[in-house]
Amino acid sequence: MANVKITWLGHAAFLLEAEKKVLIDPFISGNPVAPCGPEELNPDIIAVTHGHGDHLGDTIEIGARTGSRIFSIHEVANYIKSKGVFAEGMNKGGTVNVEGTTLTMTDALHSSSIDASGFSFDGGCPAGFVIGIGGRSIYHAGDTAVFGDMQLIGEMYKPEIALLPIGDRFTMGINEALKAVELIRPKIVVPMHYNTFDVIRQDPVAFKQVVEAKTGAKVFIMKPGDSIEV
Ligand code: NI
Ligand code: MN
């Protein structure tokens, strides 16, 4: 099995590298913990979980420069296209296959909008992705509460690695993310969407301790800019 290099760019932004480079939720230039600039990223594929600014991020700029294939829910793709950059819409339960790298859009329990000054564009529904890359199945939950159908995601796509928000307030906190691990049953968990801002301050060590005590999963605490190979 080929290896996948997973780099955390802070917040919900990850770069997965194997036969393709997949960039998820590239919130870089506004991200106080981003380890690089958006101009340093050259993905083949960009996956956007929902329209909020801390996820759509620099998608349009990176897509315009690199010609990456951009995938998101229909409404967010339409917004990106309205800015003159090609994007491809999809929806929940659907899979796209880019020369063997697959993106399956899953549910997420959250909201979605594209916020401009004084009003919001329709951002459709929030989503997550299961990414098939390098022989691995990797679940990026997006922003979400815990929900029972995470068990279905686990059964159907058998993600070995789950990237889960733990920052609380806008997403799951530690207790909810623990339940998510129990439902999904991955081998490896990487916490995300915490400590970017004060309002999502969280202790990843406490999360690691409770998950490793109560489940068979191993928790990898990353720092922005860190990579792991799986
Ligand atoms: Ni959000
Ligand atoms: Mn968010």
Image: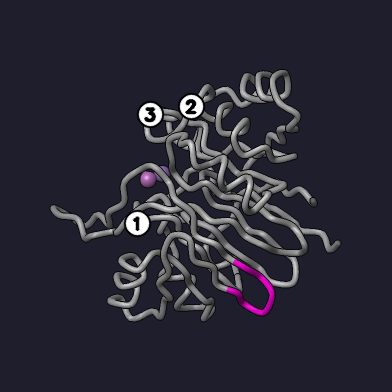
Mark 2–mark 1 Cα distance, whole angstroms, equals 21 Å
Mark 3–mark 2 Cα distance, whole angstroms, equals 7 Å
Q: Circle 1: is it few (<14), some (14-19), or many (20+) Cα within 10 Å?
A: many
- Name the residue at 39% across, 42% down: 109
Pick the residue in front: 61 or 19. 19
Q: Main secondary structure of the magenta part?
A: strand
Q: The residue under label 1 is which amino acid type?
A: Gly
- Name the residue at 49% across, 78% down: 65
Residue 17 sits in quarter = bottom right
State the SS at label 3: loop
Say whether residue 10 is left or right of residue 80: right
Q: The residue under label 3 is which amino acid type?
A: Arg
Q: Circle 2: is it few (<14), some (14-19), or many (20+) Cα within 10 Å?
A: many
**Is the CB atom of the residue marked by disc 1 within 8 angstroms of ligand 1's nearest atom?**
no
Tag 3 or tag 1, which sits nearer the N-term?
Answer: 1
Q: Give the extent of the magenta segment.
A: 97-102
Asked if labels 1 and 2 touch by Cβ distance under 8 angstroms, the answer is no
Q: Circle 3: is it few (<14), some (14-19), or many (20+) Cα within 10 Å?
A: few
Circle number at residue 202: none
State the SS at label 1: loop
Residue on which the image places disc 2: 173
Residue on which the image places disc 3: 169
State the SS at label 2: loop
Q: Where's residue 147, x and y in %?
A: 46, 36
Asked if labels 2 and 3 touch by Cβ distance under 8 angstroms, the answer is yes
Residue on which the image places disc 1: 51
Q: Where's residue 105, x and y in %?
A: 49, 59
Q: The residue under label 2 is which amino acid type?
A: Gly
Ligand 1 is located in which of the four quadrants? top left
